[in-house]
Amino acid sequence: MKIGGHDLSKYIRLLAPLFALIASVWVLRLVLDAAGAPSGLVRSCSVNAAVAVSVLIATLLIHFRRFGSYLSVVVTAFLLAGWKELLIIAAMTFTALSGMGTVYDAPEFSRHMTFSHHVIAHLTFGLGFGELFGAATGCLLLWLLRRLAPPTG
């Protein structure tokens, strides 16, 4: 399956380090919470921030490697936001199955939702808004890059 002239596997190869960055922040957040770190420190390890930075880096890669266009930015934003939501749902599933609390079931993050409602919220609103915000930001950056630093040759 080709999207924007590239196979999905090429997108995965391009984004592999960014997937690792997001997963590292996710693990760090879980470890800090399990270690009893102050809530401010746990909150500073934001998976959402890691995704936002990853979308911007992916957009830079798309521009300077001439990987594609705005469609490629939208695809990368979707893949990165989807990866984030899968990791968060994995943590929530672990919490539900093990009974051990994690940062992802804390009342200030789960808003006192049931497990199934919380998962559905991440798969709909979390993925939807993450994708829309990431794609809009990435496309704006790509537009600016093409105006200010057009690719040569």
Image (cartoon, rainbow, N blue to C red):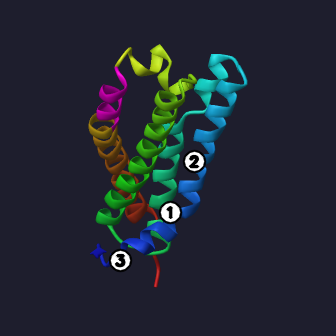
Q: Are marks 1 and 2 in contact (CB under 8 Å)?
A: no
Q: Marks 1/2: CA distance?
A: 12 Å
Among numbered discs 1 and 2, the one appearing first in the sequence: 1
Along the line of sight, which residue is nearer the eye, 37 or 52? 37
SS for dot 1: helix
Residue at 51% across / 29% down in the picture?
A: 95
Along the line of sight, which residue is nearer the eye, 11 or 135? 11
Q: Which mark is residue 15?
A: 1
The amino acid pointed to by label 2 is Ala
Among numbered discs 1 and 3, the one appearing first in the sequence: 3
Expressed as whole percent of the image width and height from the top left, the position of residue 6 reads 35, 77
Magenta segment includes 131 = no
Depth check, mark 2 against mark 3: the one in front is 2
Along the line of sight, which residue is nearer the eye, 45 or 72? 45
Residue 27 vs 42, above or below: the answer is below
Residue 72 vs 135, above or below: the answer is below
Expressed as whole percent of the image width and height from the top left, the position of residue 81 reads 40, 47
Q: Marks 2/3: CA distance?
A: 24 Å
Among numbered discs 2 and 3, the one appearing first in the sequence: 3
Quarter of the image with the N terminus is: bottom left
Residue at 45% across / 21% down in the picture?
A: 109
Q: Quadrant of residue 116?
A: top left
Residue under circle 3? Answer: 6
Region rendered in magenta: 114-122
Q: How crowded is the residue under tag 2: few (<14 C-alpha within 10 Å), some, or many (20+)? A: some
Left or right of 104 in this view: 71: left
Residue under circle 2? Answer: 23
Q: How crowded is the residue under tag 3: few (<14 C-alpha within 10 Å), some, or many (20+)? A: few
